[in-house]
Amino acid sequence: MTDPRTAYPRPPFETSAQQPPGRESAMTPEPDFGQTSYVGSGKLEGKAALITGGDSGIGRAVALAFAREGADIVISYLKEEEHDAMVTAEWVDKAGRTCVAIPGDIRTEAHCRMLVKATVDRFGKLDILVNNAAFQMSHKSLDEISEEEFDRTFRTNVYANFFLSKAAAAHMQPGSSIISTSSVNADKPNATLVAYAATKGAIQNLSGGMAQLLAEKGIRVNCVAPGPFWTPLIPSTMPMEKVKEFGSQTPMGRPGQPAELQAAYVLLASDQGSYISGATIPVTGGVPFI
C-alpha cells in the first residue's frame, strides 16, 4: 500500500522562477507524468484523441496515458512550448502510437476548427477531445488585471473550449467523449486568481449544459477538477513565496503530480465511463469539493 501523504515530493520546493508558459525540465522537482508508473490495458485501443495543452503538465500525462491505453494523439500547443511538445511526442511514440503535434493559438475559432479537421484527416475520426489548455496569472489587486489579460484568460479557457467542442461534436460518433479540465477554483475561487477561477466555473457549467445537449448523439461530456498540481504553470505565474509552499495547504500536505490525474481522464474517455456524463471528478488531495 502507498501512503498518499508521502507518495510524491512535499514542499518546501526550491525551484526557480520562470517566464510563462514555463518548462518542465527547469522545475525542481520535475513533475511526474507517469513515465515510469502508468501501465495501459487497452482501454482506448484504436481511438483517436485531440488534447489541447498537450505539451506539458496535465496534458502530457493524459497524452502518455491515452497512448499506453492504445490511442493515437493530436496535441496542440503554443509555439513557445515546442520543446516540451516534442518531449511529449517522443513518449507517445515510445508507447507505439502516433502523435501529431500542432502549434498555434486556440483563442481563434479558425484554429480550433483546423485542429479538429487535422485530427479527422490524419486518423479518420475523432473519439476523444480533452480541453486542457489554460492561461492564468496571479494578482493581489483587481487594478492589476488588464482588459487584455482578462480577455485572453476567457478566450483561452472558455471560448476555445466552446469552439473545439462544437467543431468536434460534428464529427463524433456515439460513445465519444469530451473531457474538460476544470479546477477546485470552480468551487473555491482563489482571490489571487480571479479571472482564472471564473473561467473554471464557466467551464464546469458549459460542460453540464453540453452534456445534456449531446446526450441524444451518444456523446458524453465531463470535467476533471484538479486541486493544486505541480505543473509549469505554477513557477511561471505565481509569486515564488507561494511556489515554495505550493500544495502545503491541502489535507495531504503536498501538491498533486500529473500522474495522479491519469486514471480519471482514462475512465471518462473509456467505455467504462459509459453512464458518466455531466459530471465533475475532483482530484484535490482532500480539499472538499461540493
Image (tube, helix red, strand yellow):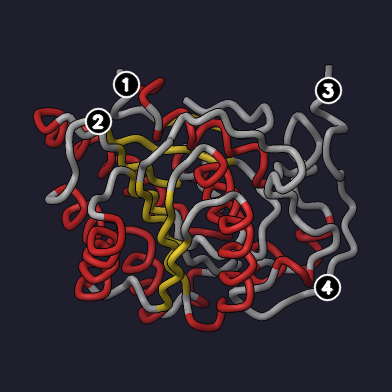
Give the position of the N terminus as an image quadrant: top right
Q: Can residue 160 be seen in this view?
A: no
- SS class, disc 4: loop
- Please tell me how crowded label 4 is: few (under 14), some (14-19), or many (20+) other residues with Cα within 10 Å: few
Q: Look at the picture and state if 7 lies above or below 47.
A: above
Q: At 17% across and 57% down in the image, what residue appears?
A: 167
Q: At 59% across and 33% down in the image, what residue appears?
A: 40
Q: Nearer the viewer, mark 4 or mark 1?
A: 1
Q: Nearer the viewer, mark 3 or mark 1?
A: 1
Looking at the picture, which amino acid does disc 3 mark? Answer: Thr
- Decide which of 63, 52 is in the foreground and name it: 63
- Decide which of 44, 11 is in the foreground and name it: 44
Q: Look at the picture and state if 248 lies above or below 271.
A: below
Mark 4 lies on residue = 16
Res. 175 mark: 2
Displayed quadrant of residue 209:
top left
